[in-house]
Image: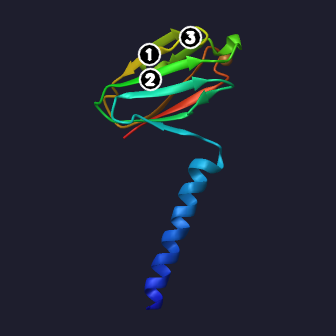
């Protein structure tokens, strides 16, 4: 094996490790719709997953299920979409989004103490 090949392999592995660290090192969980157009988000001490990957121009339903009695989490707000919804305890609430362009935005609880991220690709 040539040393240039070895360098490519090693830098590839380093990149992989960096990506892994970036996504999981911060205990950030990622949610993607799995073909059915639905991403389930558990609301418990924050949002799980906390980062949602959306596809541009594709309608995706975010299904929030609040399991946390903390009243702070009973409202979820999507400022860029003008959406504000009440989340009853243990009852799924669907929010439909159809992002018009690739962007990074977010959502948060009523008092902006817990945040989630929306990444549109
Ligand atoms: Cu709050």
Q: Is residue 44 above or below residue 49?
A: above
Residue at (60, 48) in percent of width and height = 24
Is ligand 1 within 8 Å of the beta carbon of the residue shown at mark 3?
no
Image coords of residue 29 (percent x, y): 57, 40
Question: Which residue in the structure is indicated by mark 1?
Answer: 94
Residue in front for this viewpoint, 102 or 15: 15
Question: Which residue in the structure is indicated by mark 3?
Answer: 87
Residue at (31, 25) in percent of width and height = 59
Which structural element holds mark 3?
A: loop
Distance CA(mark 2)–CA(mark 1) = 6 Å
- Choose top left, top right, bottom left or bottom right for residue 95: top left
- What color scheme is it? rainbow
* Crowdedness near tag 2: few (<14), some (14–19) or many (≥20) residues, C-alpha within 10 Å: many
Question: Which residue in the structure is indicated by mark 2?
Answer: 62
Which structural element holds mark 2?
A: strand
Residue at (49, 19) in percent of width and height = 79
Q: Earlier in the sequence, mark 3 or mark 2?
A: 2
User: In the rendered structure, are the residues bearing label 2 and label 1 in contact, judged by CB atoms less than 8 Å apart?
Assistant: yes
């Amino acid at each position: 094996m040539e040393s240039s090949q070895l360098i490519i392999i090693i830098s590839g592995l380093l990149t992989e490790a960096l990506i892994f660290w970036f996504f999981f090192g911060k205990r950030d969980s990622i949610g993607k719709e799995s073909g059915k157009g639905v991403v389930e988000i558990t609301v418990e001490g924050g949002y799980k997953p906390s980062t949602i990957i959306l596809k541009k121009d594709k309608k995706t339903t975010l299904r929030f299920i609040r399991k946390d009695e903390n009243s702070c989490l009973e409202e979820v707000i999507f400022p860029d979409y003008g959406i504000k919804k009440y989340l009853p305890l243990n009852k799924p609430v669907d929010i439909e989004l159809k992002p018009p362009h690739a962007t990074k935005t977010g959502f948060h609880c009523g008092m902006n103490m817990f945040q989630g991220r929306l990444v549109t690709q």
